[in-house]
Each structure stands twice: as C-alpha cells, then as structure tokens.
Image: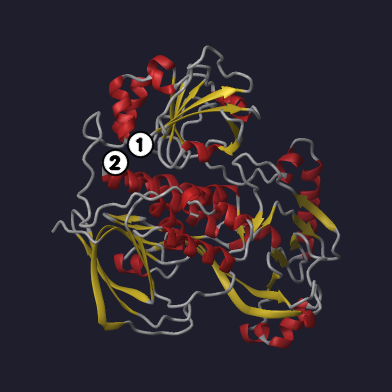
Amino acid sequence: MSAFDYDVVVVGLGPTGLTLANLLGRRGVHVLVLEREPEYYGLARAVYTDDEGMRIFQTAGTADELAADMNLDSTVQWLRADGSLLAQFNQVERTLGWPVVNFLYQPYLENSLERALERYPHVTVRRGREVVDFDQDATGVGVEHAESAGTGYCKNQTEPDRGTSERVRARYLVGCDGGRSVVRTRLGIDMTGTSFPERWLVVDLKAKEGVDAFRHLPYFDFVCEPELPIVSCPQPGGHHRFEFMLRETQTKEEMEDPDNVRAHISRFVDPDEVEVLRKLVYTFNAVVADDWRDGRILLAGDAAHMTPQFIGQGMNSGVRDADNLSWKLTAILRYGADPAILDSYEAERRPHAKAMITMSVWMKNLVSVNNPVAARVRDITLTTALRTPGLGGWMRRAKMKPEPRFRRGAYLGLPRRGLRGVEGTLAPQPQVRTYNGRHRRLDDVLGLGFAVLGYGVDPRAACSAEDLAVLDGLDCHFVTVYPLGGRPQGRPGDGRDDSDQVADIEDHTGELARWFGKAGVRRGDVMVLRPDRFVFGTARRGDTAALVAELVRRLHLRTGAKRTPEPELAVEHVTTPDYEESR
C-alpha cells in the first residue's frame, strides 16, 4: 500500500503536540492532529518556559506573540518561614536570544499555538477524535479514530463512538498524548522511575475585576517552612498559583475544602479579592518510557517522560522533543534522509530529559524538608555556598541546570573534539547586524534547515561543486560571519549576490567571535549547524569536503546528491509562506 493521507499524525493537542504541529507545518509537512477532548482544558498546568523553549517557539514563528503574554526575566527566591530572604536567583543573560526565566499562563500559550496552525492549509486539527486503533508496516502507519465526548481531562470515563470511525494512513505517528498515553499503552511500553508519595495542594487564583491583588508578590518564591513548604508563582493576566505541601495526616477532601483553601491563601492574599479557579491535590512521578520509538511510531512529551514540577521543566522537555523530532522527520520526508536517523532521537533526548528529572527531584527534596533540624542545616549550607566566591555566582545564575549538550558518541553529528569542542552542543543566538544595518536574531537569518557558516569567508567558496550540490539539495542556508568592522570593502559591484540562500552578517556584539575562539574555530573555518541549532561539525577551510561527506553519511543519504524522498502524498506538498509574510 503506497497511498498516504498525511505525512505525520500527531496525537494530542497539548504544548508538545501543538509545538510539533507548528514546526512541521512551517516546514511544509502535511499533518493531522487528533485530540480526544472536544474543548480546551482552560486552566493552567505548566507555568514556566526557559530560553531554550522560547528559541524553539521562535523557530515555530510564534515566540514574539507568546512573549507578549508572559512575565519575562522573573526573579526566583527562597524565603524563610518568616518571609525573610534566604537566597535569590537572577538569570539575566540571553545567550540563546531570550530571557531564561519566563512565567506563562498555559491557556494563553495553547490558544496562541492553536491559532498559529491556521496559517498552514496542510495542517488539519480534529478535536473530539480519539485514536481507537493503529497498525504499521514497512512504509507507513494506519490510524483509526472515532468521535469522542472527551473525559473532561480524566474526570470521566467515556467510550468513543465506533460508528463514526475513520481510518487514515500516514508515514509516521507521534504520540504526544500525555502521561496516560493511549499510543504508549497500545504499544505495550512501560515507564520506569519513581512515584513520590508527597501530596501537594495546588490553588490557581485570578484577581477579581479591577483589583490589584498580587502586586506584593512579584517574584517566584519557594517558602522553605518546615511545617508547611509553599510555592508561590506569579503568572500573567492577573493570575497566581500557590502550592502547599500536605501533612501525612491530612486528607484530599480536607485540603480541597473551600474553607481550608481560604485559610491557606489568606496568609498571602485577601481571599475576597480573588477567585479560586482550581483547587486540586496531586502527587507526581519521575518516570521515563522504556522505549520512545517503535518503527514509525514515536513518543514525545509526557508520553515519553514525566518530570516533577519543581523546576518547571515538564512542558519544556516536551517542547525540546518536538524540536528534535520535527527536523528529523522533515529531513526524511522532504530531503531523502534515511529513517535510521530517528534512532538518534531517543539517544539525544533521553539523557537530557533524565537530567532534568534528577534536578527536579533534587529541588523537591530541598524545598520540602519538614524536619526543623534538617531545614536549619539546609539553610546554613545554602547560605555558606552563596557566600563562597565563584560558587555563589554560579548558583545565583542557576548554572546547575543541565546544559543543552549531547553525550559524546550519542548524537547525530561529528565527534566532539577535546574539551573545547562544540560538536553536539547548542549554538548561542546573539543579535547580529545585517549588511543593511538592521539587527536580527541569528536564527532568523539562518532559516529553518541546515546552515553553513563561514567565519570571515563565504562558505560556498570553501565547497566544491559536488559539495554545493549536496548542500543545495538540503536547502541549506549559507552565512558569512564577519567581526564588527570586518566587512570587506572594494570596487563597485563587489560582494553582490542575488541568492536568497546566502546572507552575510556582522557579529557586532562579539558573542559569536568569543564562542568561536573558545571552540578553536579560526578565520576561514566552516561550521554546519543542524536545523535545531546544535552544531553538526566544524572544518578548516581545506577540509570542507570531509565535513560534507560526514553529513551525507550520517543522514544516510544514498549518494552525494539529493536522494529521492519517500513517496509523495496524493496531494502535493504546499509551499508555505515565511512567518513574517503570513502573519
């Protein structure tokens, strides 16, 4: 069977599925998104995104719109029980082009991401449709879905209407359907890790109309009170969240009682000035799926890993999954890469996701200390560390957060060279200056695919005709990076180029030059960046042929030229306008 209705079926319309659909849609991939729930959840779950997440939303063409509805560059604090400051963490660096600490209101984010999908006629969203069966063969996946009344987001048990079943065929299926993933369950994939017994009461509040109820709570606070650890989280649009750790003797019904909720929040706000949008007792898991791929079926987001909420990385880990998968699926479907490159998806993402889980559990253990003696030891240790030269600054900038850096030998790219090697690490994104004097974010110059950077040299001049044919076949963008004041000057007509795949930029902040220097990249060298802006590899000017050959080999292209992609859909691919043109 060779007829396909879609390139990719995405199951689940949470942040992971929405991000994946936007990234694939912007790259011209035909997508069907199936969501069991007819209506949005409408309440907050995730509250935070970081600079990595914002950079991915930038690739999806949605970051500026999303940022307009966020609290950016927020301070994070640890407070003692009496409200005095124990520690304060500020991250103002913008190495990736965006603030590191950003608090959001999830309904705003999800609504914006779903509206963005309307730009793409080749992306179809079907709400109230539940996956009831699927199967796969060597060339594709068959997916059966039926009308669903939804579960009220796991509040009710309902059965889909089998009389409304439809069947579609796609090349790939991606389960982004959460911790109770139907896709993962039907594949028989288990999750391994730890379920924590501690129960927390989460209370989401909204200031009443015309009332400034939260001005006195400007920062994200961990209240390290042994008797009652508390999290206080500001959100945009007059929203705020509190989380209270329950004692073992307290019941769910007791803690969710409106009078008890009112008593807890009254320590921080006037209960008559706010509306309680949600009150819920929950526990949390730190688990990872044993396998993230079964042939042409893949898992992403909470379907693949569940992260405790204490450093706000659950949603962001799913967004990173979407970024990693989107360009690899595009490379297979549009540029002829072999499906074998999908083996690198779990190899790259699992270690980082697990590292985030480990750090989140560590943070949970520090915040939720309920023994007064142990809490006092924690406070003294933390205070001492913050006063230690070097260590204190490192902690205040939260440098303990796992870096976006793949493990050696476990990524799609050249081997990392020595301690300074940048292969398999995420490139910075400074502001750069275009030839006409405009400032732009680096990624907006690099395009959506592979990018070839020449440091002080036109990278095409370092490539043979055969190499250029390969790179052109992948729709690579070529960029010359000049230091500030380093553009060449000459005679009339020099330097002109009509190609829309070539750009030259000035590194007016010096950030790229410093990064190149630390990595041992010299003037005249060439660097290849993957579409997710991780470094594929670097080469001296005379070694570019070997770099291109490795790109061909690791993408499993059959020849040095562009390989014929997988069979086209019955409907031809749509050429999508750039975001700047389509909004």
Would residue 50 be visible to someone looking at this image?
yes
Q: Amino acid at mark 2?
A: Tyr
The kind of secondary structure element at disc 2 is: helix
- Of residues 175 and 449, the one nearer the viewer is 449
Q: Which residue is mark 1?
A: 475
Q: Amino acid at mark 1?
A: Asp
Q: Give residue 335's mark.
A: 2
Residue 192 in sight in this render: no
Tell me residue 247's x, y (percent).
Answer: 69, 76
**Left or right for 96, reference 326:** right
Gap in Å between the C-alphas at discs 1 and 2?
8 Å
Q: Are marks 1 and 2 in contact (CB under 8 Å)?
A: yes
Q: Looking at the picture, tell me which residue is in the foreground, 251 or 257.
A: 257
| Residue sitting at x 48%, y 57% | 318
Q: How many marks?
A: 2
Q: Nearer the viewer, residue 573 or 342?
A: 573
- Above or below, comparing residue 260 to residue 169 in the picture: below
Name the residue furthest top: 491
Q: Quadrant of residue 81?
A: bottom right
Quick one: 245 or 243, which is closer to the camera? 243
Q: Residues within 10 Å of mark 2 (few under 14, many from 20)?
A: many
Q: Position of residue 84 (x, y in %)?
A: 86, 60
- Residue 434, given in percent of the width and then of the height, sits at 57, 31
Label whose residue precedes the other's in the sequence (1 or 2): 2
